[in-house]
Image: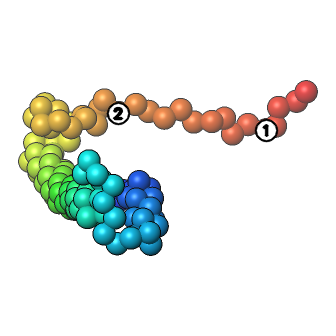
Amino acid sequence: MSRLKKKSVVVEKAKKRLAGIESISPDLDLGNGLSVASYLAEIGRTEKKLDKYNTKLSDADKALNVFQDEEKKLNALSERILEAVGSIYGHDSDEYEQAGGTRKSEFKKRARKGTGGTPTA
């Protein structure tokens, strides 16, 4: 299951504010480093970091998928090895138990429900 990619409400709000400010003047400079150009640059930097973050999430999803595939392969191999030990030494042997299996003689017997008639009140 892939991770949800992040959306930035702050970036969207800043873009709307930038559009409003540009309608006042495309070259507006309010002093102290507050200008349309600096605001636009900061929005761009923030968007790039958001894109980088979302790309890393996608990379993590891909890495997780690769890991899960390897886990499935290893689990299948483990089952095959245990079954091979059971085939050679028997499923009730000490060797089968040493390999991680449960000996047949150690299985619990399931309790059967009574098949008698309906209980009387």
Q: Could you say which quadrant of the image residue 19 lies in?
A: bottom left
Residue 80 appears in the rendering: no
Q: Is residue 10 left or right of residue 57?
A: right
The image's mark for residue 72 is: none
Residue at image position (25%, 59%) is 38
- Please rate how many residues cluster around mark 2, counting C-alpha atoms within 10 Å: few if below 14, some from 14 to 19, many from 20: few
Residue 23 position in % (x across, y down) = 44, 72
Q: Is residue 3 left or right of residue 13?
A: left
Q: Is residue 34 above or below residue 112?
A: below
Between discs 1 and 2, the one toward the N terminus: 2
Q: Secondary structure at mark 1?
A: loop
Work out which quarter of the rendered image holds the N terminus and state it: bottom left
Q: Residue furthest right?
A: 121
- Please rate how many residues cluster around mark 1, counting C-alpha atoms within 10 Å: few if below 14, some from 14 to 19, many from 20: few
Residue 70 appears in the rendering: yes
Residue at image position (30%, 69%) is 27
Residue type at the position of mark 2 = Phe
Q: Is residue 81 above or below residue 109?
A: below
Residue 10 position in % (x across, y down) = 41, 54
Q: Nearer the viewer, residue 14 or 121?
A: 14
Tag in front: 1 or 2? 2
Q: Could you say which quadrant of the image residue 103 lies in?
A: top left
Work out which quarter of the rendered image holds the C terminus and state it: top right
Number of numbered labels in the structure image? 2
Q: Which residue is mark 2?
A: 107
Q: Nearer the viewer, residue 19 or 43?
A: 19
- Give the spatial CA distance, label 1 vs label 2: 30 Å
Residue 3 position in % (x across, y down) = 34, 56
Q: Which residue is mark 1?
A: 117
Q: Is residue 27 left or right of residue 115?
A: left
Residue type at the position of mark 1 = Gly
